[in-house]
Image (cartoon, coloured by chain):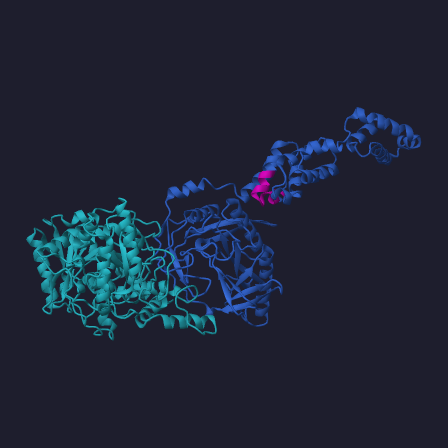
Chain colours: A cyan, B blue
Amino acid sequence: MADVPVHEWTLLEAARKVREKEISSRDLTGALLARIERLNPGINAYITVLPERAMAQAAELDEAQARGELRGPLHGVPMGLKDIFCTRGVRTTCGSRILADFLPPYDACVTEKVLRAGAVLLGKQNMDEFAMGSSTETSCFGATRNPWDVTRIPGGSSGGTAAAVSAAMAFAGVGTDTGGSIRQPASLCGVVGMKPTYGRVSRYGMVAFASSLDQAGPITRTVPDAARMLSVIAGHDRRDSTCADVPTPDYLAAVDRPVKGLRIGLPKEYFESGGLSPAVKAAVSKALSALIDQGATAVEVSLPHTTFALSAYYLIAPAEASSNLARYDGVRYGHRAKGASGLIEMMSRTRAEGFGPEVKRRIMIGTYALSAGYYDAFYGKAQKVRTLIRDDFTSAFGKADVLLTPTAPTPAFRLGEKTDDPLTMYLSDIFTIPCNLAGIPGISVPCGLSPEGLPIGAQLLSNHFREETLFAAAGAVERAVPLPRVSPIEG
Amino acid sequence: MEFEAVIGLEVHAQLLTESKIFCSCSAKFGAPPNENTCPVCTGMPGVLPVLNRKAVECAIRTALATSCSVQRKSVFARKNYFYPDLPKAYQISQYELPLALGGHIDIELPGGTKRIGITRIHMEEDAGKLVHEGEFAGAQASLADLNRCSVPLMEIVSEPDMRTPEEGGAYLRRLHDILVYLEVCDGNMEEGSFRCDANVSVRPKGREGFGTKAELKNMNSFRNVEKALEYEIRRQVELIEDGGSVVQETRLWDANAGVTLSMRRKEEAHDYRYFPDPDLLPLLVADEWVEELRKTIPELPAEKVARLSAGYGIPRYDAGILASSRALADFFEAAAALYRGNPKTTANECIHWKDVILSGRLSPGTIAHAVEDRESGTISATASKKLVELVLETGKPIRALRDEQGLTQLSDASALDAIVDRVIAASPKEVESYRGGKAGLLSYFVGQVMKESRGKANPKVVQETLKRKLG
């Protein structure tokens, strides 16, 4: 077997090779920075690349290692973060003009944890503005392109992270998922994306979109890499009141757990959906066969309120966003409109200039949904639907250990294809949204390629805090369905 | 037609905690601008609130002291509006599900006690403040001081149970005293730790239902609240009598002009788009926690007045003054324990020296000794006052000062005998008149003895001795 190029190593391999001094963090980091320099202009996966900082960090980690000091499981391994995680002294834009020059004076909990684990930060990855989008086209820093086909979108909102990992411009990344923003781009870029249980990872320092739905999680090229990353970023944090005080299991060990006897639930509503492409359906069936071949059993389940999930989501998420994004008023930080003659004018012009159209649309939807006289009909009703959706999952998990569904209805679509039609765009998250509303964990694992050669992901869902079951099932799919780990981009 | 007012009061009390309600910044007043701030209370992107347990305890204790029922589950909501002193553009406040509901306090009125209902108690965070360069209208710049952002507040909403400004004042004072007793609020009205808004309407006396109300703001003392209520009630009554009608609005009290002025009408009111704050879990209060806190509730003003009055035989009015401050009442009780002779005099002394006592410059022993010596006739009332003043000046023990200054009275009959004899011997004519029936001359002899003794003789003993010797 020919030598695998450095950038194609898995996260676990890279970490092991640094640890065993087969390669220095400097060489590893240098290799990835070179690749970013070559590929990023065409992909636009990074908003900010940090060559000097990354090399300095690598050098510092090499020296520490020479002293016999290993920081943690990611010692010396270069990776990236979605530009939604605050990084002290490194601009954190959230893909928005309004934060284009924002330098946070603090690190997000996720930032702290990956740095403490010894990771080298290569840069901040592109995303839909304030994580609002499914294609990474709403970023004020330009769209990210899918490394499998640069005329196509990488999915979103964590499209920069998925594209960077897929194009081997990072060994791993951390994204965020409010309605599918980790899983959908992972599916469209042929990588693994995991959204943990709501409360598994601290939201501290992660710019808020919809607080009751937002959750950080890893995007990697393999299931074991995702398991390793989740072990690093998970855990209780007193600074986030919604972060659960539960122990973090050994996720890596869970990946190899046999799936014999595992009950795989197939929610019929997901497969009856009109927009589901035959290629996706076929690929997901392949994943199911792989699981059955390894001793799992299939059972049909019903999630009867699935059809209401999208509507409920597009009330709850914008409502929370309308409040979360109100702080960007030009008073204390971020963009401020020039030449305004008074307070109201300054604030409205700042926001008119600073936010893109999709963000404005959602702020308006959310403001309306919370208005006096409309609250009960919209926000209140949506919360009731949310409870019903959660109940759907609870009863489904009485019959099944994990649910298997497509992650996205189609493979990656073309740039600009859906930008003029927000509703069609919103439908690309139809299979991922219910999971966020219920707060349960979900993972997208590559399970096939479309006839055009585009990656397709299968989504696995489990009950709250049962990420281990997901890693076991996803690991079984990954082992049985061999696919290229790195996108076939010229590099 | 005779009108009556309907008054409800909303009190915002700053909770006496070390740190702010949702972050660990200091909640102290008076720091240089923006010194007590952090990413959380200045609303930086991605930061999250964490509820201060001590603040919740303060609010629960207040609920218990006002007979409210503490809710097992309450919820923090976001009140959304844009203003430069509100960094998140929403205030976190309890809205639909407050911490406590349905209590009351009893207020003392000339005609007896009256029970005022308490609708609810909830917790919220304060906003910052703006400082304008120059006059507000033509200011060149406005500066935001965010020190006060997220300082913990508790809002106590009364039922519309008050009918006169005096009742409003009595309610406020009693509530104020309760909060200070509980040590949940420092009660400082000038620094804004205890603020009051009032809802006022009028209606023909005897009619059920309410008239249209106005909300009064910006009253920063008890007296101002009473004055503003008086003014507003008169204004509304006159408006109706002139054939007009009251409009629902918020009015500001202008203390200098002594009037209330319209600030905003109902139709200009904000739509705050309240919704539960997804960053905070519902606040769950276990019964055990409430019971634990119930044990920390001290004797409250009403109970204290009753006990002091009955236990020490002092007038209710005096007991009320003593109980207006827990420290003063404690001081009185300590002094009364050191000298058990006459609690009434001790109470009077404590009331007389109230301000110095509260400033911590007197010990209960000083007052006890002063009263004891006066009661025993060792010193005069004048000397007693002078000695306390000397204690304040020099810090020396009162009895040492008494002896040093020679302020002891001659109460020893044998020591006085000689002086009395001399006075009698020197005034044969007066003695004759006295014995002849001019009893009024006794004061003449007393005066002479006092003069002879250079004021040190105990007048009571002098009188007795004279009476005895003059037969």
- Residue B294: percent from left, percent from top: 44, 42
Residue B322 within the segment the image draws in magenta: yes
Residue lying furthest left: A293
Image quarter where the N terminus of chain B lies is bottom right
Pick the residue in front: A227 or B1.
A227
Pick the residue in front: B383 or A257.
A257
Q: Could you tell me which residue is drawn at 53 percent across and 60 percent down?
A: B6
The number of numbered discs placed on residues in the rendered structure image is: 0
Pick the residue in front: A402 or A196.
A196
Magenta residues, start to end: B318-331
Q: Residue B355's image quarter?
A: top right
Pick the residue in front: A412 or A435.
A412
Residue A280 within the segment the image draws in magenta: no
Tell me if residue B347 can be seen: yes
Q: Is residue B206 left or right of residue A197?
A: right
Q: Is residue A265 left or right of residue B401?
A: left
Q: Is residue B457 left or right of residue A107?
A: right
- Residue B378: percent from left, percent from top: 73, 31
Residue lying furthest top: B414
Most frequent secondary structure within the magenta stretch:
helix
Decide: is A79 above or below B430.
below
Tell me if residue A438 can be seen: no
- Residue A460: percent from left, percent from top: 17, 57
Q: Residue A100's image quarter?
A: bottom left
Q: Is residue B47 left or right of residue A344?
A: left
Image quarter where the C terminus of chain B lies is top right
